[in-house]
Amino acid sequence: MTALLPRTIFKPEHELFRDQVRKFVEREILPHRVAWEEAGQVSREAWKKAGEAGLLCPTMPEEYGGAGADRLYSAIIIEELAGSFASGPGFSLHSDIVAPYINAYGTEAQKRSWLPRMATGEVIGAIAMTEPAAGSDLQGIKTTAVRQDDELVINGQKTFITNGLLSDLVVVVTKTDPAAGAKGTTLVLVEATRPGFTKGHKLQKIGMKAQDTAELFFDDVRVPVDNILGGEGQGFYRLMRELAWERMQIAIRNAAAAEAILDQTIAYTRERKAFGRAVLDFQNSRFRLAELKTQVQLGRTFVDHCLDLLLKGELDADTAAMAKLWTTEMQGRVVDQCVQLHGGYGYMWEYPVARAYADARVQRIFGGTSEIMKEIIARAL
Amino acid sequence: MTRKIFTAEHELFRDQVRRFVAREITPHHDQWERDGIVPRSAWLAAGEAGLLCATMPEEYGGAGADRYYSTIVMEEFARAGASGPGFSLHSDIVAPYLLAYGTEEQKRAFLPRMATGEVIGAIAMTEPGAGSDLQGVKTSAVRDGDELVINGQKTFITNGQNADLVILVTKTDPAAGAKGTTLVLVEATRPGFTKGRNLEKIGLKAQDTSELFFSDVRVPLDNILGGEGQGFYLLMQELAWERLQIAIGAMASAEASLEQTIAYTRERKAFGRAVAEFQNTRFKLAELKTEIAVARVFVDRCIALVAERKLDTATAAMAKYWCSDLQGKVIDECLQLHGGYGYMWEFPIARAYADARVQRIYGGTNEIMKEIIGRTL
């Protein structure tokens, strides 16, 4: 397809990095897709190779094993994985959500003990917010962390946790003071090796088949008070700090996935014949694809605009919410039409468009549902 | 969200335009709607205020301004719901043809008076049997000595009643298809040129959209604009900018409608609380705000590109199609949030609704836009 408008936010060094990432994905990720989908998780070996290739935690400071890179490097990794429909590896959650919490709020000892090994892929990170009865409404969290001398005793249950089975280190959102509401929320670092911490079963999902989304159980898990991340009672506030960037990660992924699936669909309709001519030669196909290309272009322009604001520290929460809302809804429309243009093949799992369709559905749900995004945007009206 | 494409000078100009609209346009618009036309006095006032032909060179009466100035005029009129004055067609479509393809004599004869508003311009493409498909034009211009003799009929012509000068799309060689198309300047004073009905429309009530008839109209060969047989090619040159103008108006109208609707739903009570407090209202408004924000960023990118003469046709087609569609959706939802009042003509949202419908049709229907985008797949 004719390219979209030229992107203006990347420098040549970013493009070099993109080439490296693309080659890595082709070599180390795509060949394992079927095996990982069957296993329901990505291999540890892939994490270590990603670490070796510099794909984990690039934005962390060099002294903690990162590359001190800007967030466009993170964006590139997200885009290249999304553009290859590689939804298994939870790299961006690990690198761009979990690690930044430790870097921003961790003590020197916490940073030294975790960040370098997260950058190599030896330690896989997760963050556990959602509970069976508390999703977007974080204030409803019931997992408790009760102080006993210089330890915390954790009890509760988490669910829908990305990297749940593989995780070595979990940032657990707990209530240290259930009566204090948001102010009673505390982040606690819990190592997977702690007695009483068990991983539940791997959840079967509509899509994201190679991603280990799991339940986690905490039964009298004892951690030292030193495992508190960012101060007792500070959890809710900490979790709000980088929401704009965290939501942008979803928008970046969706813009890239929508663009890639559109490309594939254009190629498919050009090859595929029906009634003696290419499917692309039918006016309906061209009009639908023209509509999709327009939406992909708008999504791309808006995401790049937001990324530019983000780098300048000017991206506000409601604009990021708009990016998350609009791109996830757009991706949903695009993949649905693309399945349609593939006909029966579009329903077959071996076709990327089928997996893209299944993967897309959750984008409107996680990271704050579309409805929560609308609440946030409405507050700024 | 802050827009990043305008300079401080542009913003000063915007203030001027806004004040002009509030003073010279808005108070009269109701009357103009009843009249079906904007009076010449308003054109002269706009000329005096520097709102006409701003991008024309100073030697031809313009201000040598960039296209951001044109954008601002369009935006301020669209925001105010001032859909009557056909200024942008005059300034940003007709005048640029004269400037780009006219002879020195043609430019001197018309451009300075177009900039003052003494001469009102129109362009006549559409015919009863030829809309988006320009190759179907039947109006003929037949050479007779050193004159052209024009016969035919045009319709849906903006500024049709007011027009003093019409760029007429004719066939000088009907057998040659696109290559037989020629643009001819026809003054309204030419014998045999008559203005037909001022057409009743769903919206754009103050705009004099008309039929034009040509019966053995004679003009000198010097009235050919841009060379015989060149018409089709010349009409293609600035399509990106011409279509973006529609997107610019669409966005400004959608934004203004949303602002009005937010204000209205805050004031209006239902079941004991403000309409804006219902979750459905807030979600709808959040959706509209998001749609507008995304399209705004895109259109501003297109404006910046068109100002550098770098906007391609397909991207402009995306802007025209997407923004005019969006304008329709946004205003429809906004009208709904107004309840019964939204259906009443005295409310701006009712007029915006009626005005919006044609945006998906003229300047190339949105179906034509999809054809254009479809060719780049």
Image (tube, coloured by chain):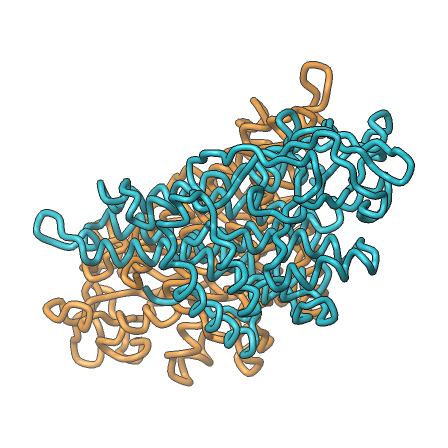
Chain colours: A cyan, B orange
Seen as rendered, the residue at the extreme bottom is B104
Residue at 51%, 43% in the rendered image? A212
If the image is split into quadrants, where does the N terminus of chain A sit? bottom left
Residue at 42%, 62% in the rendered image? B316
Seen as rendered, the residue at the extreme front is A195
Seen as rendered, the residue at the extreme left is A276
Q: Position of residue A112 (x, y in %)?
A: 76, 62
**Left or right position of A334 against B343:** left
Q: Is residue B270 above or below residue B100?
A: above
Q: Tell me how many marks there are.
A: 0
If the image is split into quadrants, where does the C terminus of chain A sit? top right
Q: Is residue A12 above or below residue A117?
A: below
| Viewer-side residue, B208 vs A7 | A7
Q: Position of residue A375 (x, y in %)?
A: 66, 35
Q: Is residue A188 above or below residue A19?
A: above
| Viewer-side residue, A34 vs A219 | A219
